[in-house]
Image (cartoon, rainbow, N blue to C red):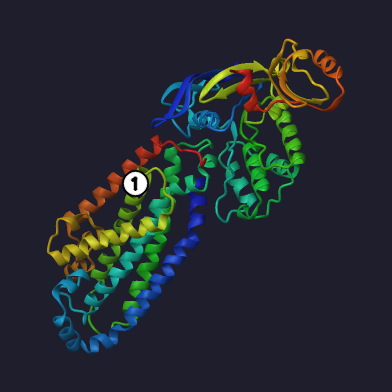
Amino acid sequence: MNIYKKELAMKFKSVASWVNPIFILMLAFMSLYPSFSAEASLLDEALANMPPELLAAFGMTGIDLSTVAGYVGFIFLFVQICLAIQASNYGFGLVSIEERELTADFLLAKPVSRTQIMTGKLLAALTALTITNLAVWASTLLVINLFNAGNEYQTGSFIILLLSILPFQLFFLAVGLLISLLVKRVRSVTPLSMALAFGMYLLVAFGGMLGKDSLELISPFRHFDSNYILSHSAFETPLVVINIAVSVLALVGSYILYKRRNIRSAN
Amino acid sequence: MSVIEVSHLTKYYGKARGIIDVSFNVEEGEIYGFIGPNGAGKSTTIRLFLSLIYPSSGQAKIFGKDCIQFGPEIRQEIGYLPSEVFYYEGMKVLDLLKYSASFYKKDSTERMLDLADTMELDLKRRIDDLSYGNKKKVAIVQGLLHQPKLIILDEPTSGLDPLMQKKFFNLIKEENQRGATVFFSSHILSEVQRICNRVAIIKEGSIINIQDIKSLQKDNYKKIRVTAKNLEANSFSLPGINNLQQENNTLNFFYKGDLNMILKAISAYDILDLSIEEPTLEEIFMHYYE
């Protein structure tokens, strides 16, 4: 419990530093929507002239940017990239930070087991992600409300999209954590997080361009494709199962690896 | 009763040597020195005690219980001062000490404030802003605030000024008189001699000697350097002289035995300069344990 409290207290700044830009990003994009939708025919014409590979790379095949759902589905991709980097950051840094800052010698010499340490830290990270999650819910519903330009939309399908954030982030948290324990030493977290988040995104983007969908099956960007969710008002159940299975396996593996890990001294 | 029992403890990092077949016991109430040059395996041994790392083979028991199996339980009664200083970003000294205290069953607030006062530690400052020496003090207070039965010190004095070192040694002696057993790792022979009852010497991963401090001092070589007119190396043929080297009018050698004898031999000459020193640990290893 003391570990949870301390870890959470140390994450508040980080949560704010993710939530604010995400809100500003949504607000900025969404404020353009009324003028977009007013000139819908021009826009559709422009899109029709673009190469289909480019559209596929941005997940824009078969979507209509003039509708609220189509437009939000498009900008949600950028939100997802932010959320993926944030969750990866927490995953890669969760226990590796102790070795980098030499605090492992402090913490692990206390009368706690490695399992307790990991659980305390994981719960703190999950709480931080939940706070982020709630803020994204509020931002999304607010900007849709403000800038829907009088067009129709189904709140229900947005709720389903927002529900995807939790498993989406859990995937990056768990996989980042697992990788951090598979390597000898994590020197810097951010480059790894960027690589994991963009790597997963690129799998889907290239998959779309090349028309191959086998690789993208491991990517959360495919598991929780915002356009699919918004146009069908549903998840693709098999993909969600893959996503959750990978996350659970990564978490279990992380516990096992951390319990066995040799914490080497700095020198 | 043995507080620490180490039997055939071995640790390899991949192929790299950590420690090999280390065995020794530390008795209750002892201040036990653990000495060796850097890289000899001192920290490895300590990290095995705390199950920061796991042994390749062999076993270490603390309070009669296996270090790995009963790790969290054993660590209730261990106070550990790591060799490297650490900090959590943005944390104040007081927050860190409270956090440290929160892991133990007993209420340590009073002892914590006491120790901080003794070590002249400013509780309100952020740890990141502290000097190396002050960070070291934070480590000392967090390691002792729960009045542990076993205190493990890994190179504790580096970065402390002599005055603070003295205070620190007094603190350790007090804790020892209160009943705490102390395991003191260092590469500085003099500080181990100053405080310890027994000492184990480790070299290249293996224990090469375990001795009483008294007999170690009695056995100890002195490093002597004499500069005098018309020196003759031959006249220094006393038993106990070792590694005699002459350079013009200067003689360098190690001597073990009655100091009066050697002083008589030296005083036969017209002395220009004389120094009698403790050999460094490396010199002891090189000459004493050849």
Task: Judge left or right: residue B111 versus residue B62.
Answer: right
Based on the displayed image, in which of its 4 quarters is residue A136 positioned? bottom left
Is A257 positioned to the left or the right of B172 in the image? left
Q: Position of residue B154 (x, y in %)?
A: 60, 34
The front one of B278 and A188 is: B278
Q: Chain of mark 1?
A: A
Q: Quadrant of residue B83?
A: top right
Image position of B9 (left or right of A180): right
Label 1 sits on what residue type? Answer: Leu
Which x, y percent locates residue A146? 34, 81
Front position in the image: B220 or A255: B220
Q: Residues within 10 Å of mark 1 (few under 14, many from 20)?
A: many
Q: Image quadrant for the C terminus of chain B?
A: top right
Residue B178 picture location, percent across and down: 71, 26
Q: Is residue B149 left or right of residue A72?
A: right
Q: Residue at x 31, y 60 (%)?
A: A197
Residue B170 vs A49, above or below: the answer is above
* Residue ID for mark 1: A178
In the image, what residue occupies the spot 32% across and 42% down? A252
Residue B107, placed above or below residue B49: below
A68 vs B219: above or below: below
Q: Is residue B183 visible?
A: no
**Mark 1 secondary-structure assignment:** helix
